[in-house]
Amino acid sequence: MAEVRLRKVVKRFDDVEAVRGIDLDIADHEFVVLVGPSGCGKSTTLRMVAGLEDISDGEVLIGGDVVNDVPPKDRDIAMVFQNYALYPHMTVFQNMSFGLRLKHYPKAEIKKRVDEAARILDIAELLDRKPKQLSGGQRQRVAMGRAIVRNPKVFLFDEPLSNLDAKLRVAMRTEIKKVHQQVRTTTIYVTHDQVEAMTLADRVVVMNNGRIEQIGTPNQLYHTPETRFVAGFIGSPAMNFIPCQLEERAGALSIRLTDSLAFPVPEAKASRYRGRAANGSMLLGLRPEHITEAHGHLEPGAVPFEARLEVTEPMGMETLVYFGVNGAQVCGRVNPNSGAREGAALRLAANLNNMHLIDEATGRVI
Ligand SMILES: Nc1ncnc2c1ncn2[C@@H]1O[C@H](COP(=O)(O)OP(=O)(O)OP(=O)(O)O)[C@@H](O)[C@H]1O
Ligand SMILES: [Mg+2]
């Protein structure tokens, strides 16, 4: 096992700069997820670590050694792709042991490693089957088993679950997490699904347009996003962004949304924003879970207001409500018993303790 370092890594395809100078330190045993929209450079970054793509500029280090010029087969990494590319004519055992047999490992050692991986993945009963006799999830396990038996320094996953249906994805996600708890191999995992990223990662790397926007634990990214992009990318339904102005009157700060609607800034947040009033256009960032029905007594920082609901979406355990504020569509999450009805007004409360203020010009969270 090993740590992985990327130093100012750049990838150019002719005149396209797909990866624009990435610095990333991944610790031994760590599970890091690269997440971001399609085309942001996730796969290209992973493929440079794997050695499947030349590095245009910068350095990749595995276990302290620069590997820029080391061919993929000598990097001691194992990669699991979206299409698992199992050999159809081989049994599960033969598929899993293929790499070890190529390297002339002793038979007993091969059997020991395959049995151990099959135990971890719960596929011991399937070792004599051919891939076409397996379900999608079972094939995915075999692909992971093939990686595990090699006992590599690093696992690389590129969207390994995207061929599975929604239910199986969730189950396999848990499976991958359990496997990592047991084998503890340093892992870089690529997905465009922020839920997958949040649930799997020790640390999440949010990429956008060939650059890293922010690196942090799932909770850090959720609670303290540094940019509008990260704030909007992490969390579902996504954070609301409402055009606003920061007002300061007699030392008291408030967020002005419309002529008739302003939210006082809670004391705990005030020092952060003081002196920023009249600094140009801003956006109030508030997650749907921080807009709920107003209870009898409100916590400090929760501000009641009334909204005319345009759309309601019952989800069972909660109801999503949509309404307009200052030209923005805003989503809140209320109790199914709150009496929310389309076309009717509802008393809601915004929890300003969880507010974010974004400078529209720079896209940065203040
Ligand atoms: N072989 C190539 N030649 C030219 N351009 C490429 C090549 N491979 C990737 N690109 C470009 O590099 C950029 C990053 O691609 P990459 O595959 O890394 O994105 P990604 O983040 O993995 O996206 P997705 O979520 O769709 O898989 C894209 O603009 C893509 O068109
Ligand atoms: Mg990709």
Image (tube, helix red, strand yellow):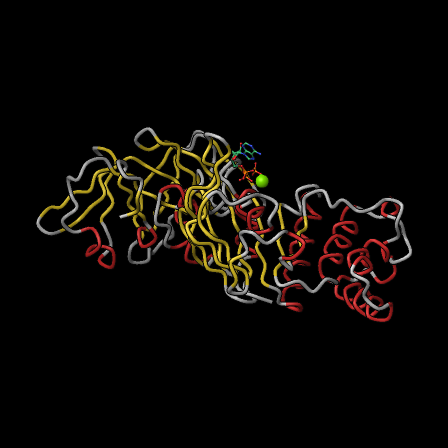
* Relative horizontal placement of residue 107, taking residue 20 as reference (left or right): right
The quarter holding residue 255 reads: top left
Where is residue 323? Give x, y as percent: 40, 33
223 relative position to 185: left or right: left
Relative height, residue 357 to residue 111 (above, below):
above
Residue at x-position 81% and y-position 55%: 98
Q: Nearer the viewer, residue 13 or 242?
A: 13
Q: Position of residue 92 (x, y in %)?
A: 85, 54
Q: Give the residue displayed 79% in from the left and 47% down from the top.
A: 86
- Residue placed furthest toward the right: 128
Q: Residue at x 58, y 62 (%)?
A: 186
- Toward which corner of the image does residue 283 lie, by quadrant? top left
- At horizontal 66% and vertical 42% (from top left) the residue drawn is 162
Q: Quadrant of the N terminus?
A: bottom right
Residue 100 lies, with reference to residue 35, above or below; the image says: below
How far from the left and from the top, in percent, is residue 119? 79, 66
**Residue found at the far front of this picture:** 69
Where's residue 161, x and y in %? 67, 46
- In screen coordinates, is 98 left or right of 278? right
Question: Residue 357 or 12: which is nearer the viewer?
Answer: 12
The quarter of the picture showing ligand 2 = top right
**Number of numbered discs:** 0
134 or 115, which lies in front? Answer: 115
